[in-house]
Image (cartoon, helix red, strand yellow):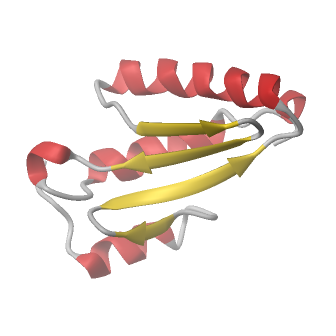
Amino acid sequence: MAKLADGEVRGFLDDLEGWKHFGNAIHKDFTFPGFRGSISFVNRVAEKANDAGHHPDIEIHYNRVLISLSTHDEGGVTEKDIALAGEIDGVVSPDDGG
């Protein structure tokens, strides 16, 4: 899957709330009321990512989770990253407080 041009990435991100494009990746910061909500969310993200054969960079900071998506083999953002971003947005649960 080919790397998207910056303008293409911006166009896709218009449909994804809160995702930002900088460097060679797209990023989003999720906030939860506590550590358990963060971990529950990360576990669901891991399932979606594994099903997609794609593995995001994940940083956990107590009640914050930063997700970064990039297709390293292509050197930047591809449609695979955009699709996974949508899947990730879909696993935020009200039970997490996110």
- Residue 25 in picture, x, y percent from top left: 33, 59
Whether residue 82 is situated above or below residue 60 in the rendered picture: below
At a point 10% along the width and 44% down the height, the residue shown is 73
Whether residue 37 is situated above or below residue 17 in the rendered picture: above
At a point 54% along the width and 63% down the height, the residue shown is 19
- Residue 65 in picture, x, y percent from top left: 63, 42
* Location of residue 45 by image quarter: top right
Q: Is residue 21 left or right of residue 14?
A: left
Residue closest to the far front: 61
Whether residue 75 is situated above or below residue 87 in the rendered picture: below
- Residue 5 in picture, x, y percent from top left: 20, 74
Q: How many marks?
A: 0
Front residue (pair 5, 56): 56
Quadrant in which the C terminus is drawn: top right
- Residue 63 in picture, x, y percent from top left: 77, 39
Q: Is residue 37 left or right of residue 91?
A: right
Front residue (pair 64, 96): 64
Front residue (pair 76, 15): 76
At a point 34% along the width and 26% down the height, the residue shown is 52
* Location of residue 50 by image quarter: top left
Q: Is residue 92 left or right of residue 27?
A: right
